[in-house]
Structures are given as C-alpha cells and as structure tokens.
Image (cartoon, rainbow, N blue to C red):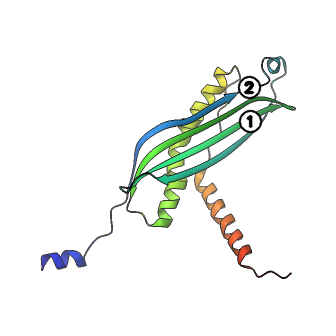
Amino acid sequence: MAEEQAAGTQEPAQQQFVLQRIYNKDLSFESPATPEIFKKQWQPKVNVDLNTRSNAIDEEGNFEVVLTITVTSKMEEDTAFLVEVQQAGIFFITGFEPDQLRRVLGTAAPNILFPYARETIDNLVVKGGFPALMLSPVSFDALFEQALAQQAQQQAAAAEPSTH
C-alpha cells in the first residue's frame, strides 16, 4: 500500500545543471600578412562569428557543449589575423523538459564557456604580436530567442501553400 501511495505521488525529477569540465577542443591562430602588417597604422575591421552545438555523450545526462568563436581582423584587404577557438564543456543536466533542456544547452552553458573563450582569444592575439582584443559580452539568451523566431518564420514560410 505504501508503494502504491509513493507511485501515485511521484514528484518530478529535480532539475540539476552541473559543470563537469571545461576544455579547449580546438584552437587556431593565423596571421598571414605578417610582418608587413605591423608597418601599417592599426585600424582593423574586426568580424566576430559565434556558433554553439551540443550533444548528449551518454544516457546519464552528460552533454558536451561547444562554443565556437571565429574572429577575423582585416586591414583594408589584408587579413591581420584569424582566430578560431572551440571552447567546450561537459555538463550534467537532468530533470528538464525538452524545450527547457534546449534553452539550457543554448544559453546557460555558452554563458559559462564564453569568458574562457574570450580569455583564450585575447591571449592568442597578444602572443601573435597584436594589441589586446577583449570581446564584448554576449547575450546568449537574446541570440537563442532570435534563433527561435527565425526558425518559426522559416516553418511558417514552408507551411504556406505555393501560388505558382
């Protein structure tokens, strides 16, 4: 009887989000226009691309999240430097509904990884002989909402009947 009561009052699983490990998955630094680029007045155009991906690595609730940041700095047509960092982490995540899990993987985990990637990029740029590069903070929540809105627009456009 106690077992029946316990089964009938089963509580939802407790939500857990625990960082297990942070590591560099891949690093790349190129400065193809050196040493000539150092003779120019330093006024670069900097482009930053962000990407995240995640995957379950076991059945116990461990996920790998990889934040990829690519920074391209150009002086006129010359590439001063190109840096790509894949900052990764293993997170134990359990007790979340699928939509909540997607949000945690797309926002909370990258928010933890970003400062590490930012520091790595700055170190690589300085060691490459260039002035320090501190990337501005990023709102992964806003990027996630933007991606959801874009996905909804694409689905709506795909669902519209063709008038051709």
Identity of the residue drawn at 69% across and 64% down: 150
In the picture provided, is 73 more to the left or to the right than 3?
Answer: right
Quarter residue 94 falls in:
bottom left
Query: Residue 105: x percent and y percent?
Result: 51, 54
Q: Secondary structure at mark 2?
A: loop
Q: Is residue 106 above or below residue 31?
A: below
Q: Of callouts 1 and 2, which one flags the residue occurring earlier in the amino acid sequence? A: 2
Q: Secondary structure at mark 1?
A: strand
Q: Is residue 145 above or below residue 67?
A: below
Identity of the residue drawn at 13% across and 76% down: 2
Q: Which mark is residue 144?
A: none
Query: Residue 38: x percent and y percent?
Result: 79, 18
Q: Is residue 49 above or below residue 27?
A: below
Query: Residue 145: x percent and y percent?
Result: 62, 61
Q: Residues within 10 Å of mark 1 (few under 14, many from 20)?
A: some
C-alpha separation, residue under disc 1 versus residue under disc 2: 10 Å
Q: Quadrant of the N terminus?
A: bottom left
Identity of the residue drawn at 16% across and 75% down: 3
Please name the residue that numbered disc 1 is placed on: 72
Looking at the rendered structure, the kind of residue marked 1 is: Thr
Please name the residue that numbered disc 2 is placed on: 31
In the picture provided, is 138 more to the left or to the right than 162?
Answer: left
